[in-house]
C-alpha cells in the first residue's frame, strides 16, 4: 500500500509539472495495480 501511495503522489506531482498525459495515466494505473496486489496479499490461503 505504501508503493501505491508513492505512485499516486508521483502522479499528482507530474500533473503539477505539466508532464505528458500518458505518464500521469501510467502512474495512476500502476498505483491501482499496487492496491490490488496489496489486497490480494492480505487474503488468506484458498481452501
Image: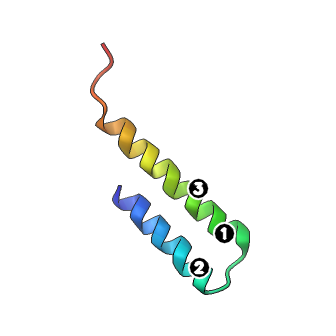
Residue 33 position (above or below residue 15): above
- Among the 4 quarters of the image, the one containing residue 25: bottom right
Give the alpha-carbon distance from disc 2 to disc 3, as whole Å. 14 Å
- The location of residue 22, given as percent across then percent down, is 72, 66
Residue at the spot 43% in from the left edge and 59% down from the top edge: 4
- The location of residue 12, given as percent across then percent down, is 53, 76
- The location of residue 43, given as percent across then percent down, is 31, 31
What secondary structure is found at the residue carrying circle 1? helix
Give the alpha-carbon distance from disc 1 to disc 2, as whole Å. 8 Å
Instruction: Say which label, 1 or 2, has the lower sequence index.
Output: 2
Give the alpha-carbon distance from disc 1 to disc 3, as whole Å. 10 Å
What secondary structure is found at the residue carrying circle 3? helix
Residue 14: give its label: 2
Residues under numbered marks 1 and 2 in contact, where contact means CB atoms less than 8 Å apart: yes
Residue at the spot 59% in from the left edge and 79% down from the top edge: 14
The answer to whether 37 appears left or right of 20 in the picture is: left
Q: Residues within 10 Å of mark 2 (few under 14, many from 20)?
A: some
Residue at the spot 40% in from the left edge and 64% down from the top edge: 5
Task: From the image, tell me which residue sits under label 3.
Answer: 29
Task: From the image, tell me which residue sits under label 1.
Answer: 23
Q: Residues within 10 Å of mark 3 (few under 14, many from 20)?
A: some
Amino acid at each position: 500500500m505504501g508503493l501505491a501511495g508513492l505512485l499516486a503522489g508521483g502522479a499528482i506531482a507530474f500533473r503539477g509539472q505539466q508532464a505528458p498525459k500518458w505518464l500521469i495515466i501510467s502512474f495512476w494505473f500502476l498505483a491501482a495495480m499496487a492496491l490490488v496486489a496489496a489486497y490480494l496479499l492480505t487474503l488468506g490461503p484458498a481452501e
